[in-house]
Image (spheres, rainbow, N blue to C red):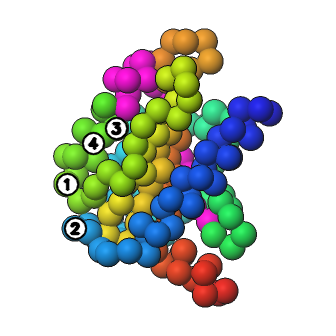
Amino acid sequence: MRRRRLVLALLACAVALALPVLLGAPQASSPGAASPVSGEAAGEEAAPTVLGGDGPLALPDAAEGVVEVSPGVSAQVSGYESDLPLEEEARRCLERYRNEGDCVVSRSGYLDLLGGTWGCVMQGDGWAEVLLVSEAPDGAGSEVVVWRMDAADAADALAGG
């Protein structure tokens, strides 16, 4: 329960940082492009995707699909578990974003004093993703959760629609 509250608090902070990015200047990608990490396109109701895999995985301590990140604002959420340590998995995720070439890192860094959770906010043209990579509870591997928001959804929510 504490972990879920921590993740939700981190998500709320990341969303607060991402909203100005979402409503800011466009970047090089298209709003409907698939996420390099989650594999989902904006507006799709697809199941979470496993990197390098071919099927959905349940999210650790989180919900799948669409979640409300603040009143009236929703985000696609997906995630997976990895055998790689936190640092290697974070590097692999950033390399996937770099290989897509359609986004920039808006914010990144460790989110706790012990280095057990790393996160970043990625910005593309009309979308933003919040990526969290956490050390697995047993210390073997890592867990990844990605929240994706697009500008149209955020603008609708801010306009009251």
Tell me which residue sits at (30%, 74%) in the image: 26
Label 3 is placed on what type of residue?
Answer: Cys
Name, please, the residue furthest toward the front.
Answer: 113
Tell me which residue sits at (26%, 69%) in the image: 27
Measure how far apart labels 2 and 3 are at the Cα level. Answer: 19 Å
Do callouts 2 and 1 mark residues in contact (Cβ within 8 Å)? Answer: yes
Label 4 is placed on what type of residue?
Answer: Arg
Do callouts 1 and 4 mark residues in contact (Cβ within 8 Å)? Answer: no
Check residue 93 in the rendering and tell me which mark sits there, or answer none: 3
Q: Is residue 142 left or right of residue 66?
A: left
Span shown in magenta: 74-90
Q: Which one is earlier in the sequence, the residue at label 1 or at label 4?
A: 4
Instruction: Assign a secondary structure to mark 1.
Output: loop
Do callouts 4 and 3 mark residues in contact (Cβ within 8 Å)? Answer: yes
Instruction: Evaluate whether residue 49 shows in this view.
Output: no
The residue singled out by tag 2 in the image is: 28
Q: Is residue 158 left or right of residue 119?
A: right
* Relative to 113, residue 22 above or below: below
Q: Which one is earlier in the sequence, the residue at label 2 or at label 4?
A: 2
In the image, is residue 11 part of the stretch drawn in magenta? no
